[in-house]
Amino acid sequence: MRAVNLKAKRQGWIALGAMTALAALLFYFAFGFSGGNFWLKIAATALILTVTSLFLRPPVPGGLAFRPKDLALGLASAVVLWLIFWLAKGVSAWMFPALADQVGAIYAKGQGTPQWLIAILLFLLIGPCEELFWRRYMQAGLMERLGPLKGWLCATGLYTLVHLPSLNIMLMGAAAVAGAFWGLLYWRWGRIPPVIISHAVWTTTAFVVFPIP
């Protein structure tokens, strides 16, 4: 029995490592190559990672079911996160004026893509898929093996580092803050539906409805 448990544990680590490598490769392709539509590349990245993670870690019955309170928690947390970024934007512009152009560069990636298409991709595909992969699969797996705190920190760090190919310090900082926030939300409530709502609503709001720059 002990040998079986050790084998399963080793296989779990191998799967997490392989998925981390796949995520790094896909994000490098999305950010590192100028060809193709940026938002479609991000959507494809999120979809590939999610489908693969659902195969490796199938959802438990009812685990993805939405409850009425999920909507309230998701919407409220999205508002809180938007306010955090709005305040942080003012502080960063004052403390690091040289990095102001990097914020605009994030939004510039959407040039040439209709706003309605960006909104649909963010709300229905990118936001939900990123949470299913980064929190439901990566963070949950790391928390099981390293403990809640270390697992949350490690998952947040990986979510931040995959944005390194963007060569955008502000984007990496935003990924760190948002990843830590959604990771805490998942850690506290232990359910992915409210985190999906939070991510989908926040990204759609911050990039399309009420941009922060």
Image (cartoon, rainbow, N blue to C red):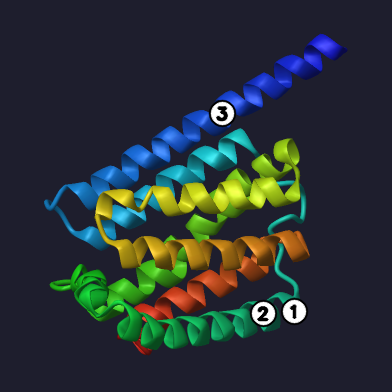
Counting from the top left corner in percent of width and height, residue 109 is at 20, 67
Q: Nearer the viewer, mark 1 or mark 3?
A: 3
Query: Where is 194 relative to 133, above or below?
Result: below
Image coordinates for residue 84, horizontal then vertical, percent: 51, 82
Q: Quadrant of the N terminus?
A: top right
Name the residue type under label 1: Pro
Classify 32 as above or below 65: above
Dot 2 amino acid type: Leu
Q: CA distance from mark 1 to mark 3?
A: 34 Å
Residue 3 left/right relative to 138: right
Q: Residue at x 67, y 64 (%)?
A: 184
Residue at left 62%, top 80%?
Answer: 77
The residue lying toward the viewer, choosing from 59 and 77, is 77
Q: Which mark is residue 68?
A: 1
Question: Please, what secondary structure does the residue beneath circle 2 have?
Answer: helix
Horizontal arrangement in the rendering, residue 155 relative to residue 141 (left or right):
left
Give the crowd class for mark 2: few <14, some 14-19, many >=20 residues within 10 Å: some
* Tag 2 near tag 1, CB within 8 Å: yes
Q: Which mark is residue 81?
A: none
**Which numbered disc, 3 or 2, marks the residue that appears first in the sequence?**
3
Q: Which residue is mark 2?
A: 71
Helix, strand or loop at disc 1? helix
Residue 133: where, in percent of width, then height? Answer: 54, 49
Q: What is the x, y in percent for residue 68?
A: 75, 79
Callout 3–callout 2 Cβ contact below 8 Å: no
Residue 132 in the figure: left or right of residue 1:
left
Determine which quarter of the picture holds residue 96: bottom left
Residue under label 3 = 15
Q: Is residue 107 visible?
A: no
Separation (CA) of disc 3 from disc 2: 32 Å
